[in-house]
Amino acid sequence: MRGMTTDESPGTLSGVRVLDLTDERAIYGSKQLADLGADVIRVEPPEGDPLRRRGPFATDGAGNPHSLYYAFYGSNRRSVVLDLESDEGRAQLRRLALASDVVVDTGRLASAGIDVAALIEEQPALVVVSVSSFGSGGPWADYLTTDLVTGALGGLVATTGDVDTQPLNTYGELNFVTTGAYAAIGALAALRHARETGEGQLVELAAHEAIPSCLEHVLMWAWHHEALPIAESNVLPRRGSVHWSDVYAVMQARGGSIMVTVTPDPAAQLAWLMEKGAEEDLLDPKYHDLLQPRLLTMRMMEVLRDWVAEQAVEELFFEAQGRHFPYGWVLSPERVAASPQLEDRGWWADYEVGDTTVRGPGAPYRLEGTPVASTRRLSAPGTDTAALLDEIGWAG
Amino acid sequence: MARPLDGVRVLDFTHVLAGPFATRILADLGADVVKVVSEARPGNTPVTSYFQMWNRNKRSLALDMSTNRGREIARSLAERADVVIENFSPGVLDRWGMGYAAVAAVNPGVIYVQMSGMGDSGPWRDFVSFAPTVHALSGLTYLTGMPGREDIGIGSSFNDHQAGLHGATVVLAALESRRRSGRGQRVDFAQYELGVALTGPALLDYFANGQSQQPAGNQHRFELAAPHDTYPCAGDDRWVAIAVMTEDHWSRFRTALGDPEWAQDSRFATAADRLEHADELDRQISEWTRALDAYELQARLQAAGVPAGVVQTGADLVHRDPQLAASGYFTTTEDSGAYAAPTPVDRLPLHFSKTPVEQYRAPRAVGADNVVVLDEWLAMPEEDVHAEEAGGTLR
């Protein structure tokens, strides 16, 4: 399969050693570094990482449950179990940090009494990425967060939901995906500087600051609403699937739902409706005022809603795409799993979970020179403890 | 002061949001991002507020790519670039004579990132997409919303931002790989595959267990947690999110409520009980929250040790959030660029102790950097640049 490789090929980040001290807030960042081929070492407590207890689960041949959350977020790591309640465990953690290129942490160093500045003084090329909920100062520094609370305070929850629902969080923990993605960027940017100059550093990131940068129209509304012909105030209330531009919306078709838009070519969309005899009153000159193009596009969205309701969803989707209209069929996970596009591109990966192999998501990018491996292996807690202690010269 | 990507040259053909957000991050980090724009394509210029949001810290080179001379200059620039990045449909750069093979033949170290909708192969290769399209096809729209509703989904172009973040990540990773091997590479980045990957645990659940997950409102997807929702507060459309993740949180939450009789009911004894009776639980909590100010409630619950936060709007973030204000998260550009005055910006959320990212320059007028960029990248004399401008290539 094109773009796939065996585990023997060098990864993009071969030779980069990462100590992974993240919880759910930034584990997506260390996941990316692991998928890109870095040697990522995850430290777990003697009872195992609490994230291993998150669902959903798969049951292996011996009847043991395995976390699929953890298979997705925690694979391709070496696992070391350390007892950070003990002086020895904390000393081992410190030694592991000093033997790394990058440490990604959500507070474990501080709770083990390890001072980051002293670490970097001892190993000047070390990069430490420190991820917190709200930052190290300010009135909310000690607040607790979860993905829902991060999305609420960060502004994403307010955009999602409909006029007749409460504000909604996105599927899963996508606010922490954003946070983790920034953590990976911080790690790799600081690593480049360290490679070029020998100078490591501390990189700090707050989940609360990650979210507002990824809100598309929201800050544009807050800052530039007076310049936007379609903004009535500095806040656009949630309104289901209707995009801020008004010209994308999910509509009900026969047999399913479909995201319909008149962009990027309303004239071609109108021609299609005319071809089908479905243009209703769209040719009325009142909709064709060159100074007010939205009169046409807004009416076209109404006409489309009626027309789409009569169409079979699958045929409509493929006909629209055949005409280069960016319609999108609303698909469930079951249908996504059957995508001919993903199959043809050999996109899926194999997740080794206990003694079974489960198909799951491949990488979000295809590096043709240093492909991401197509296997994700989930290590049992402590699998690599002895080897790692040996590598850092720990004479137990 | 040094920035992490000093000396990295990026030739930027991106437009709309996904690609420009990737190059915004690279530019913030100190890369020399040269954005190729043209008065012939006014949608991708500073006249729109949308462009204004995503194109700070980049230099502006005006190049009419419909002309042979324009493409010739672009090819020369690609020879000297560390990174070439675009988010067209597949095939556009090939038609300009600057596909990966052509560029790599003269610049083997180039990192060449193509952020198309579907990727450069497969039966859907030529499908066109914006973020709402990708959300629909990937399962993100289906999974985000209320049970029985397929018409909610994420209320902004989330996947475009993710594409930008992942695009920047893959550029940085490829730079590290090149440092070791001396070789660049092409990256075929499908925004659709990214969207699908973001539903990871749901897909694994399907393949392992045959479970096709359903929309579930604000219910936690990976743990038993209740109450776990947004609740109405006093005022017009004000809400607070409350996330009781543990029995300790529940005990603290009950205390904060004043331990009313209903909360002692056995139907609410454990997380599983509370989930089973979530409708009644949420109704009781809403009765309590409805009379209270959202920010006061947040402070009260946080003081009690319960994760809670106001559902903040963009106006709240900019004008009210004391935490963002304390960290100086919002600032204005140091210059006016293409505009009459400096423009507001949200800072890159990464705080580097040795290479701080503190330069924020406004998006530039079309072609404002023609002379300096063509001098630095191609050693083109200024009079030649002006001749090309007059001739219509650099516009």
Image: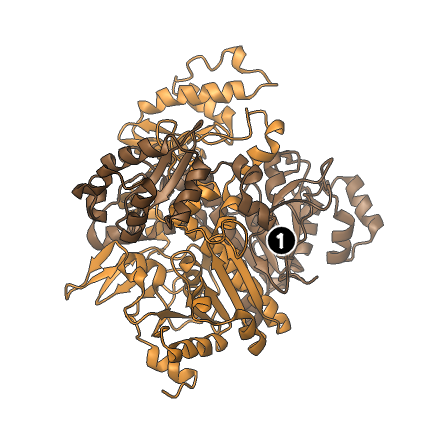
Chain colours: A orange, B brown
Q: Quadrant of the C terminus of chain A?
A: bottom left
Question: Where is residue B253, by image quadrant?
Answer: top left
Q: Is residue A166 visible?
A: yes
Q: Quadrant of the N terminus of chain A?
A: bottom left
Question: Where is residue B376, by image quadrant?
Answer: bottom right
Q: Is residue B64 above or below residue B101?
A: above
Q: Residue furthest right?
A: B383
- Residue A358 percent coordinates (x, y): 25, 59
Q: Is residue B235 above or below residue B338?
A: above
Q: Residue furthest front?
A: B258
Question: Could you tell me which residue is drawn at 23 percent across and 35 percent down?
Answer: B280
Q: Nearer the viewer, residue A200 or A108?
A: A108
Tell me the subunit letter for badge 1: B
> Label 1 amino acid?
Asp
Q: Residue furthest left?
A: A62
- Residue A205 percent coordinates (x, y): 52, 56
- Residue A280 percent coordinates (x, y): 41, 14
Q: Nearer the viewer, residue B27 or B104?
A: B27
Describe the element under mark 1 as helix, strand or loop: helix
- Residue B38 percent coordinates (x, y): 67, 40
Q: Is residue B164 above or below residue B355?
A: above
Question: Could you tell me which residue is drawn at 59 percent across and 29 percent down?
Answer: A225
Q: Which residue is mark 1?
A: B28
Question: Could you tell me which residue is drawn at 38 percent across and 57 percent down?
Answer: A24
Q: Is residue B41 left or right of residue A48?
A: right
Q: Is residue B361 above or below residue B169?
A: above
Q: Nearer the viewer, residue A173 or B49?
A: A173
